Image (cartoon, coloured by chain):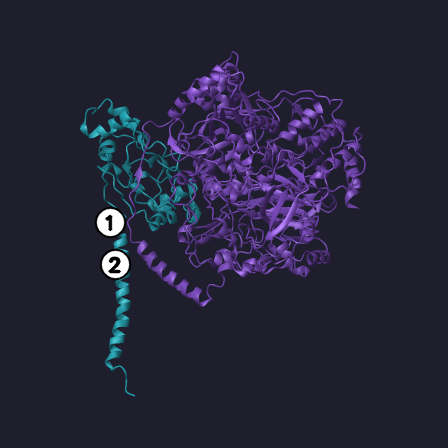
Amino acid sequence: MGQTFHRSTNTLARVSIFGAVFILGAMAWLAATVYRSAYFTEVGESKEQPVMFSHKHHVNGLGVDCRYCHTSVEESAFAGIPPTETCMSCHSQIWSDSPMLEPVRESYRSGESLVWNRVHDLPDFVYFNHSIHLSKGIGCTTCHGQVDQMPLVWKANTLFMEWCLDCHRNPEKYVRPLPEVLNVDWRPPADQLEQGRALMQAYEIANLTNCSICHR
Amino acid sequence: MSDKANSRELIDLRRIRGKLDRLRGRKYWRSLEELAETEEFKSFLQREFPENASEWTDPVGRRNFLRLMGASLALAGLGACTKQPLEKIVPYVKQPEELIPGRPLFYATASRLGGYGQGILVESHMGRPTKIEGNPDHPASLGATSAQVQAAILGLYDPDRSQVVRKTGRISTWDTFLQELGGPLQTQKAGGGGGLRILTETVTSPTLGALLAELLQQFPQARWHQWRAAGRDSVRQGARRAFGRFVETRYDLSRAEVIVSLGADFLFSGPGSLRYARDFAAGRRVHGGDGEMNRLYVVEATPTVTGSMADHRLAAQAGELEGLARSLAAELGVAVQGGGQSAHESWIRSVARDSSGRGGRCVVIAGEEAPAAVHALAHACNARLGAVGTTIHYTEPVEAQPTVELESLRRLSDDMQAGRVEVLLILGGNPVYDAPADLEFSEELDKVALRVHLSLYEDETSARCHWHIPAAHDLESWGDARAFDGTTSILQPLIQPLYGGKTDLEVVAALLGRPGARSYDLVREHWQQRTPGGDFDQLWRRSIHDGVVAGTQAAPVTVALQADWDSGPSEPPSSGLEVIFRADPAIGQGELSNNGWLQELPKPFTKLTWDNAVLMSPATAEDLHLTTGDRVVLSLGERRVEGPAWIIPGQADGTLCLHLGFGRTHAGRVGNRVGFNAYPLRTSDGLWHASGVQISRSGSGYRFASTQSHFAVQVEASSEAERRHLVREGTLENYRSHPEFVHEMGHEFPEDFTLYPPWEYSGYAWGMAIDLGACTGCNACVVACQSENNIPVVGKEQVILGREMHWIRVDGYFKGELDNPEFVHQPLPCQHCENAPCEVVCPVAATTHSPEGLNEMTYNRCVGTRYCSNNCPYKVRRFNFILYQDWETSSLELMRNPDVTVRSRGVMEKCSYCVQRINAARIDAKVAKRKIRDGEVRTACQAVCPSQAIVFGDINDPASQVSQWKADPLNYGILTELNTKPRTTYLARLRNPNPEISSE
């Protein structure tokens, strides 16, 4: 009985087997690239909000302290989004007729909350706590970027787990002196690693990588 | 049904007896199936999940498996290709004071289960109540709650609760109701209210009592009736018989050296049970010193939580109880009629001798289900023993209007029959379902011209009423309630009524011509009127904040036995079978039937879920040629009920026990048609006990969902080396003379002989110790854990497959003879092994070891291989085989603990030592630059435990309570011969037997 397949089939088989490996590899690469792209992570992408609130204007221009609005950032997991009342504490006096602020006034009149679009949204199985980060010398800008330069807030970082772990494994790269945590102009000094290690000692920063620190 | 399901596997009880006789020394067993070595038990013992174990070898199963796996792989890949959905943040308009977003607040209020107040603290996350804790300042709670009160949070969010006012089934409104009630009410007013009747459950609320009293003034001919099926009539009747008036009896068990229970389940049921459990356990705690230990004697017909704690337990028919009580009284020197012979003479004599001469530091407690005569006898015994003023305190009744409820309901029924009732308002309760059968309540009810029912659910009674008004849940209401000792709590709402429910106060106020009155104003007015002078506002605020109104304890009274307190022995019960009725240990008298947490709660001793049964002793089953799973018909005169039989060791021979609360038809989606309804057999002259019952077999093969064999670990073995000493016990005597006896039971493992990586625990090292001598098996921990950790309900079919999800289970062991066993309860959460077998087998590092010794489970990593579960010798891991969690019902979303991940299918889970609580405490401590204090982290099971059987803390801190417990000679770990080094350890149970009895 003759051969069922011609000899050239061998080549075909080889090409398609190796080809398949390359194609699968290419697909994996493509998926990984897309997954890390800004399209997916939304890094640098500002979100539409019911009121065009500018952090740049309030923080950089007016010098309002972060905690004026984000009141619970030092004592709770959640930093807090200000109630309408907080906005109105100034805006009942200044810019009280601005059409841009009409949704705020409407909320105050009607008692209906403003509904903001969430920018920094961790998956539901991740438990982040603001208070502990501030009290251990991790500043606002370390994660949130230069909020004082953002007219509408965007994500400065991916919030991927590897990004979290970058700091949880090597906090010395990012930790800063406690008085500086709210300072948006703080920049790491030239000897950050050395200073960071000293601060880690002083603040007793350790054991950040076991799973239940963030997952429970 | 297949032949296989129909075949009866009769358990050979004679063989079991022989086997137990041959086993020498301590012998522990979990079920009759274990002793009989049935196939089902063996498969539960040897296989993790027996039902699916054949999946791979069965060709059809394998093909199915591959198909499903292929599909799920493909879908899992696609599932990752979605962007994160946009979420919203909705801040307050005006943020409430004291609220810090992201931190829970706790509000003091009270539960009114059974009518009596139990102080609770409710955890509220930004306005939604999520978890109930006990109120440490409340005398009936001291920080603990029962399983039923824990489950109230699920009751609040139950999507089956009634949501609208209905008139004869059609949707209506509150305003229409008020309008239409106006006419009949005017007519009643003209006639002095002669046709107006109010029916409530037991009322301790001072405000409701006052409003109803006002109503009776406006309508002088009207009547207020009370009825609760599992009420405390016999307690009240007994007091009336002994003292000629209603008084409340309060026990102080902290001072009792000897406690004699005459059918009383005082550690588990009744308004003071949490307090009694605490005091009882404290009186038995000898570790860490050579303290004294109280001694408990129990006479009972069916095994109860209290009976399982007894040093000496006598299983006797309920019909014999009065005779035994008489003998005891006679032995103690009380002048009683007919206190002569009894079957257990020497036992009774020993009990009497033991309790005499202790200067009153002893107490005789009669059960709420015992006849009034037994209560009167107990009062006489206590007076004779000098216990009054020491272990017993008599106070004014705490009910707003104490009454014998059966008489009250009978009067109402008679009036309805005679056509004297024109308007009937039923405020709570479900009398159509639970009234005594001979009153034919529902037929009589139909004769009433206008019937109104206020209740949480559209239940059996609502269906027979013209109007149904949805009631507000206790967690949605302002109100008040008195505890067993009279202490009053103000109820405050945690949330606006979800479905616009009304409180009983609001309905009564509407009758009084104040239709718009709010409960808040009614309660506040009531207390303001009764607080002369002073700063009422401050008192009000303090009372609400603390959860108790200071100085409201019931006034003590001095009572003396009436001359004719003893009306002589009741007629002896006819011989033969008797039937007793008991409130179900999970769902009570039926008001909690629609609560999935309670339906799925394995009941003590039977570990039955989703069912009740006709409970009978092994000897009775042999006599009747019955076995577990047989369907039987019970008949009492012309009344019949049908249900499946269950053999329960430890029950009195000749007694059949039926649990109430099942067989509901209008409970809701969870509770409908679960179990069988025992009420049709319950008549007014046999509320708790009736003799002369006939039984016949009508079928077989009923499938129970009992967890008794699930997650079993082999205990007994042919050789000593293979025996597992999971449960260790001794006597007080043993302990004093030879404290190390516990350790000599186990097999030690050479130190440092291990392949596991060494761990160093330099910071905190979390550990737990569980005192088997204090654990009563009440199940509060199981529900507390379920509530804290968002644990789903799986349903009866899945429980049969062994897939219940409880993170902590309470293993029940029988010990000794088949016919008169002793009981031990062993709560089993994850042991958090230092050498954890589960960790090394996880291929994706989803279960890992923390530097503090926690065995962590990371759900988002878990791919569901189940290797960990397979490798866990304690069988504490639970797998989400299918999507058990309800992701659809929006009201249930509000209930979940936001600090714990809600698990999806395909994920392993298990006890985390409440890691969310540890983390919260650690962060707080770090922010405050201090260490976590001992007792700052309390796991959910620890916090709820009425008898304080669980302690948790840092074992690296030698001063911590858990370290001290673990240093006790009674401390031991289970399966330590596997060198797992469990962080959860147990304190062996000590018994304090009376040498006079045990030497017999």
Residue wearing tag 1: A38
Chain B's colour is purple
The circle on residue A30 is 2
Chain containing mark 1: A
Graded by Cα atoms within 10 Å as few (under 14), some (14 to 19) or many (20 or more), the crowding at tag 1 reads some
Chain A's colour is cyan
Query: Residue A87 falls in which quadrant of the image?
Result: top left
SS class, disc 2:
helix
Where is residue B938 drawn, in percent x and y? 52, 39
Q: Is residue B884 visible?
A: yes
> Is residue B706 found left or right of A157 in the rendered image?
right
Query: Residue A151 falls in which quadrant of the image?
Result: top left
Where B650 sits versus A179, above or below? below
Where is residue B47 drawn, in percent x and y? 54, 60
* Badge 2 amino acid: Leu
The circle on residue B182 is none
Where B44 sits versus B573, above or below? below
Where is residue B80 drawn, in percent x and y? 31, 54
* Badge 1 amino acid: Ala
